[in-house]
Amino acid sequence: MLSPRLRFAIAVAKSASAASKWIGNKGETLPGRILLAIEPEAISLLAAGKEVILISGTNGKTSTTRAVASIVSQLGEVATSGSGSNLAWGAANALMSPAPFAVLEIDELHLPAIIAQTDPSVVLLLNLTRDQLHRMHEVKRVADRWHVECTEATNTIFVADIDDPFINYATVNAINVVRVSFGGRSHPDGAVCPRCGSYLTWLRGNYSCTCGLTNKISDAKFKKGSAAYRNAILANLVGEVVDAPPIAFTETQLERTVVKDFAGKTAHFRLTKNPASWTEALSAELHPEVILVLNARQVDGIDTSWLWDVSFAALRGHSVIVCGERALDMAYRIHVEGVEPVLANSFEEAISLCKRSDISVLSAYTAFFELVM
Amino acid sequence: MLEIIRIHNELLGTYGDRGNADVLKFRAGLRKIRARVTDISYLDPLPASGDIYLLGGAEDAAQLLSLTALRKGSILKKSADRGAVVVAICAGFQIIGNKYVTRDEEIKGLGLLDVVTTPGDKRLVGDIAIRSDLFALPLTGFENHSSVTTLGADAQPFGRVIEGNGNGLAGLDGAINKNVFGTYLHGPVLARNPEFADLLLERAVGSAIASVDDELALRYATWRRSLLK
């Protein structure tokens, strides 16, 4: 039975949602904010009657949340986050639904509080690498917070990709963990053991530490593959925990890719927002013409120093056009690596400069949403 | 052959500072100065033959590991004493100071610069610009740390802060002593400020170097300066 205050808060939030949509917003932030302003306990109150599943990590949150939601929806109606709406008010907004299941994408810094408030049955932890350092400050800082909350969440089953040492450390003292390994992979920030501070020993993508932290001992082992392939398997493992039948996903279903036509040309968009996602994107097949779009707003990360931690050598031999608010940061970066870009003033101009029908577009977070959504 | 030593990038590579070595090699190449970047990992001995040594930013545990490895043989200090160029950013700057203090302990540094770093009470995150007597124009960068660095009698400040925080004290950033430079500017600082890269090349070569026309570098540096408040 909902309290009168919670019922009032939901009513106000829902009318705000309708109004917000009417004026052209997606209507996912405002209602959640209103709900939490009127009833600060709304998230825990609304989660109480639901089976809650949370997904977090630096990369792959949105697509994996979609995959988990479709798997769990075989069991019953699922409330889920709007695309990228992964802060507390996004969770509050999704939880207003009467659905018996909630599958929510949660921002890395918000995860501990949302775990504490929703007492989730399953939490899927994908990876932790450098992202938005102006906000996260340090990867270890985020992992420390996860470590504390994962240890305390004794009712929750964690599905953890322990090939990432930060994920392994986060769940090392948790009571219920399904530790998953894909046979190891390198980690851009994984030189130091996040548990004890020693120099990690890495051998062919697998790590071990004198303190015992290693990915060599796991509960489920799979062969190596792309991030999309791994996330499809992890999503189905979450499904297995809640007794939902598996779904076979194609890799493209789990990639943050969108194909969209612009002025008679086909642009193949891919979301690239930090060193790990850029490296993943640049290891895939690219068209001869490539457009790079770089912004540096809050959610992109306001600093672009990290561009120098990505190797753009894969772009050699391609025709590269750079645009976006921080186009010059990108242009100079790849110039020093021997890739000579053409600078465009806008994405439309960049497209118009392309001569072929299919173009690869690697895009920062904010630009990706503006151009394809 | 100009030897550029990039020290412990797997530890001191949190913030893109590896790009400083790439820019130095690139700008040396524009002048037909042969240069090579050598990556030295935590497990490798530090060569004593470097012309330029580079250290970058790091998280706490990585910073301590790097310092511990660099103490062996005091090679960096000896290289600096013979006139080699050393550029140390953020955590690297703290490592080459006299000491730095964490919440738990006091750690003796490598002693290349007469500075002491202590924990500050707030995180200093954002764009930074400084004015240094070494350059006609301001230098720009990005800072992200939570320390306060105090200069001793033997260290000169690298620059005066005109935007941001730097050392977190007295409106100063960094420290210099002959060819040893410490600063809080990421960016990477040499990508954002080619005149700084050229000064380092000149110091390493030991004579004036030709001016070059890299239009994109100039355009980039000028544009980033134009964003100053």
Image (cartoon, coloured by chain):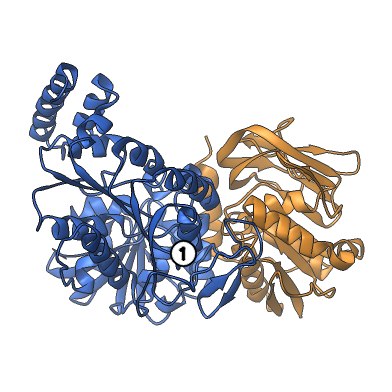
Please say if B28 is above or below A157.
below
Left/right of residue A3 with respect to residue B192 in the rendered view = left
* The quadrant where residue A223 appears: bottom left
> Which chain comes out orange in the rendered image?
B
Amino acid type of the residue tagged 1 in the rendering: Asp
Q: Quadrant of residue B133?
A: top right
Q: Is residue B152 left or right of residue B40?
A: right
Spot occupied by residue B177 in the image (x, y as percentages of width and height): 85, 51
Identify the residue at horizontal 65%, vertical 72% (top origin): B25
Element type where label 1 sits in the image: loop
Chain identifier of the residue bearing label 1 in the image: A
Q: Position of residue A342 (x, y in %)?
A: 38, 67
Q: Is residue A197 left or right of residue A322?
A: right
Q: B20 or A271, which lies in front? A: A271
Q: Nearer the viewer, residue A23 or A106?
A: A106
In this figure, which residue is indicated by the disc labeled 1?
A: A164
Task: Name the residue located 66 percent from the left edge and 41 percent from the top edge.
Answer: B130
10 Å neighbourhood of mark 1: few (<14), some, or many (≥20)? Answer: many
Q: Position of residue A260 (x, y in %)?
A: 15, 64
Point out the image quarter for the N terminus of chain B.
bottom right
Q: Colour of chain A?
A: blue
- Residue B219 visible within the image: no
Instruction: Determine the residue located farthest toward the top in the rendered image.
Output: A4
Q: Position of residue A255 (x, y in %)?
A: 26, 66
Q: Is residue B193 left or right of residue A271?
A: right
Q: Is residue A343 above or below residue A143?
A: below
Residue A228 appears in view = yes
Tell me if residue A220 comes above or below residue B66 in the rendering.
below
Q: How many marks can you see?
A: 1
Task: Answer above or below: position of B133 versus B6.
Answer: above
Is residue B75 or residue A49 the one in the foreground?
A49
